[in-house]
Amino acid sequence: MGLMGTSPILDNGETPIISVRGLKNSFGDQVIHEGLDLDVRRGEILGVVGGSGTGKSVLMRSVIGLQKPTTGEIDVLGENMIDRTEDEAKNIRRRWGILFQNGALFSTLTVAENVEVPIREYFPFIRPPLLDEIASYKIAMTGLPTNAGPKYPSELSGGMIKRAGLARALALDPELLFLDEPTAGLDPIAAQGFDELILGLKERLGLTVFLITHDLDTLYAICDRVAVIADQKVIAVGTIEELLALDHPWIQEYFNGPRGRAAKAA
Ligand SMILES: Nc1ncnc2c1ncn2[C@@H]1O[C@H](COP(=O)(O)OP(=O)(O)OP(=O)(O)O)[C@@H](O)[C@H]1O
């Protein structure tokens, strides 16, 4: 643990699932990241934390190829993400699932139809009833009742929308899941249920999870390691216990403030 090294090979000899080196992102004069390094290991849930506007979402967008960095190297699932052809990019996108902050469902499609979108895109030869069966299976995996399939997003609660978004993220059996603040806006019980769902799916499906969150309960409950973004880079990464041992004001305030202490005690 501790401060990031520069080798893309981890201590245990494994190649990381995500490797970011020397990332710089800027918008005009505003520099968001500079010299940012990060590794995500196979099978872990890595939490990404940092103050508002430190560039957590921009980091995720860079990793998934939606935001071209100013400079830097990004490897995901063994593929170099910089300067890829559209075909290569499409192939790699099939191997991960993304849950955006607001669920990002198509409002004019039912839950089942939303889940079917990526399947239709990549496997156009799969037709109903198999398509519907796959969608029902994914919907059930996320703990939604079977009657959620024909519903429209506007008929769902916030927690159900997140689950439907997750069902769509799981549509193509991804190896890697990106979650952007999955419990934001959920009540504590729904948030806890969602945490348990993520942890269960990670264990059963062997997923690797990149998770942006402000939710201290989530960090304590399900994250194997936590990466802290401050001063335009990942200043530290490790278990919460390891982070607590570091003498950084933001880390101390975040994990040892009243909310951090309450989450730890829970
Ligand atoms: N496309 C863009 N054009 C210009 N500036 C942008 C763009 N995307 C993000 N930014 C800026 O980059 C900074 C980081 O944004 P980002 O959304 O990644 O922060 P964050 O850490 O995810 O914040 P929060 O915790 O509040 O969600 C912000 O100042 C934002 O205004």
Image (cartoon, rainbow, N blue to C red):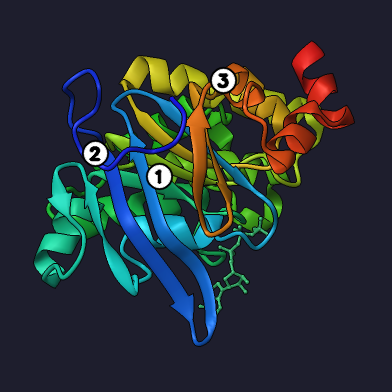
Q: Which mark is residue 84?
A: none
Displayed quadrant of residue 65: bottom left
The label nearer to you, 1 versus 3, is: 3
Crowd rating for badge 1 (residues with CA inside 10 Å; few <14, some 14–19, many 20+): many
Q: Earlier in the sequence, mark 3 or mark 2?
A: 2
Three-letter code, disc 1: Ala
Residue placed most toward the observer, 4 or 97 = 4
User: Dividing the image into 4 quarters, which one contains the N terminus?
Assistant: top left
Would you place residue 145 above or below residue 7 in this image?
Answer: above
Callouts 3 and 2 close, C-beta under 8 Å: no
Residue at mark 2: 130
Report the front residue among 82 and 8. Answer: 8
Between 121 and 1, the one nearer to me in the picture: 1
Numbered circle sitting on residue 242 = 3
At label 3, which amino acid type do we have? Glu
Q: How busy is the neighbourhood of tag 3: few (under 14 within 10 Å), some, or many (20 plus)?
A: some
Question: Measured along the vertical axis of the image, is residue 55 above or below residue 213?
Answer: below
Q: Is mark 2 within 8 Å of ligand 1?
A: no
Q: CA distance from mark 1 to mark 2?
A: 18 Å
Mark 1, secondary structure of its residue = helix
Of callouts 1 and 3, which one flags the residue occurring earlier in the amino acid sequence?
A: 1
